[in-house]
Amino acid sequence: MKKKIIMISAILIIFLAACSVLFNNKKTETQLPKVTVAEVAHSIFYAPQYVALHKNYFKDFGLDVNIILTNGADKVTAAVLSGDADIGFSGSEATIYVYNQGEKDYLKTFAGLTQKDGSFIVSRKKITNFTLNDLKGKTIIGGRIGGMPEMTLEYILTKNEINPKNDLTIDTSIQFAAMQGAFVGGTGDFVCLFEPNAMINILLP
């Protein structure tokens, strides 16, 4: 496991090192090029990134990296377009939305850091031997329409011969950052959450 984390961290280091070239920053003896990364969520799924940051791997490669939390791909996009962040870490759908709006200063996707969606399905009630068929006839908070978690949910349901339009209700009215709070407040039978928020819901009384 440790070797895997170090390997993935190395990939992240190379990725951010390449960014310094994009920003045309030059390293001096006293000051490292600063790169601000806006991420869509703090999650255990991105542990290698945090390991690289706190072990100073980025500085070893000549970069001063700052990670900020901007809940939701729309907020990540806004941070990059406004100049508050140099890189946005979110689903690639954000770049498509901006481009389709005809913006001259549109975003570009230039790297993929994960191959899987990091969200988990959390149930309001304990279900022994859960299967996706348990979602039929129920309501699940899936995230906004067109967002990566919601699209991944629909994809997985379809792959398992469950019609996401007819066999269950996917609530897409709740913003990414508010999904956990809405579920705790009584909305939905299920919710898609990233860790550690998924575990927090299990531990709640």
Image: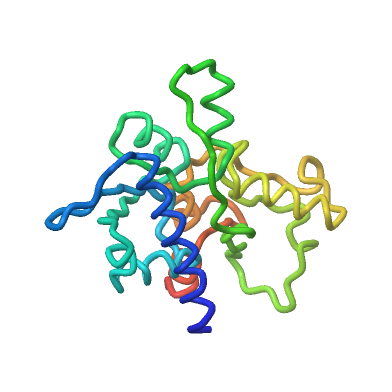
Q: Residue 199's spot in the image, x, y percent?
A: 48, 71
Pick the residue in front: 152 or 82: 82
**86 over 205 or under it: above or below:** above
Which residue: 28% across, 59% down?
Answer: 62
Which residue: 30% across, 33% down?
Answer: 83
**Which residue is most to the right?**
161
Pick the residue in front: 125 or 199: 199
Pick the residue in front: 159 or 111: 111
For the image shown, how many numbered marks are present on the structure? 0
Q: Residue 193's spot in the image, x, y percent?
A: 53, 59
Which residue: 53% across, 15% down?
Answer: 102
Quarter of the picture holding the C terminus: bottom left
Splitting the image into 4 quarters, where does residue 17 fall? Answer: bottom left
Q: Residue 179's spot in the image, x, y percent?
A: 48, 50
**Which residue is most to the left?**
30
Which residue: 61% across, 43% down?
Answer: 171
